[in-house]
Image (cartoon, helix red, strand yellow):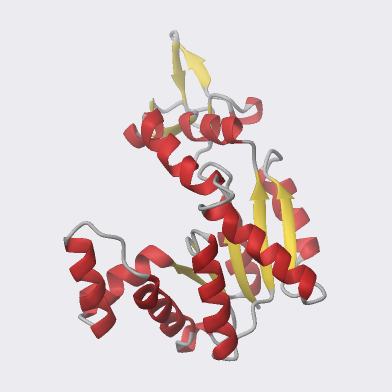
Amino acid sequence: MNVLIFGPNGSGKGTQGAIVQKKYNVTHVESGVIFRDNIKKGTELGKKAKAYIDKGDLVPDDITIPMILNRLKENDCKNGWLLDGFPRNGEQAKALNKALSDAGIKLDFVIEILLDREIAKQRIMGRRICEKDGNHPNHVFIDAIKPAEKDGKQVCRVCGGALSARADDQDENAIKKRHDIYYDEKNGTLASVIFFKELSKKNNGVPVIIELDGTADIKTVSDELMKKLQ
């Protein structure tokens, strides 16, 4: 099973991707990790990518696509993969699709987690981290997991530990920039999603497009996803 997953920051994309990885024993492939690995290992593509990165320039697709394709051909991807973080625009989607086709690699599913932009922003800004256990869910905007209160302060709803917010979760400008890229249907990530939806229509439903309501809780979303991945 080969899968692409899309969703804005705050949609729970990472959580749902991890569930798919565990359930179907596929390899979770992140584009950022591919870049770092190639640069660290000093591969030819890594050296070329580093030259652009060092100048503050975007790495061209003719370097990025081969790096990703090489990763998807590695042994741990033979049982399937879930690619996260790429493509980020329509042209990259076209180039990736062609590269996969030329390599004889079938794309089976494209998962899109749908979430209103303002809700996505609140999801990010409302996250709180427990000092005792980072896996304790606390969120100021979600009633089911709202922090508890003690002596006029918010504390972890699970263990009563002190809570904090990540600095980048509170940076509205940074969130806006990430979301500007994702929600742009002409030049951003949603252009990639649109490309694959149109491709699916032309190819009689291949790849299968799975749309999920990101406003639901994690279990509801994952249950729906598991049904549609059958």
Q: Is residue 50 above or below residue 157?
A: below
Q: Of 36 and 79, which appears nearest the observer?
A: 36
Q: Is residue 185 left or right of residue 59?
A: right
Q: Of 221 and 203, which appears nearest the observer?
A: 203
Percent coordinates x, y for residue 26 in the rendering: 57, 75
Identify the residue at horizontal 21%, vertical 69% (top origin).
50
Percent coordinates x, y for residue 64 in the rendering: 38, 73
Q: Is residue 170 above or below residue 222?
A: above
Which quadrant is home to the N terminus? bottom right
Q: Is residue 54 left or right of residue 98?
A: left
Percent coordinates x, y for residue 78 in the rendering: 55, 87
Does residue 135 show up? Answer: no
**Number of numbered markers:** 0
Does residue 151 show up? Answer: yes
Residue 33's image quarter? bottom left
Q: Is residue 120 above or below residue 150?
A: below
Identify the residue at horizontal 61%, vertical 28% (top origin).
142
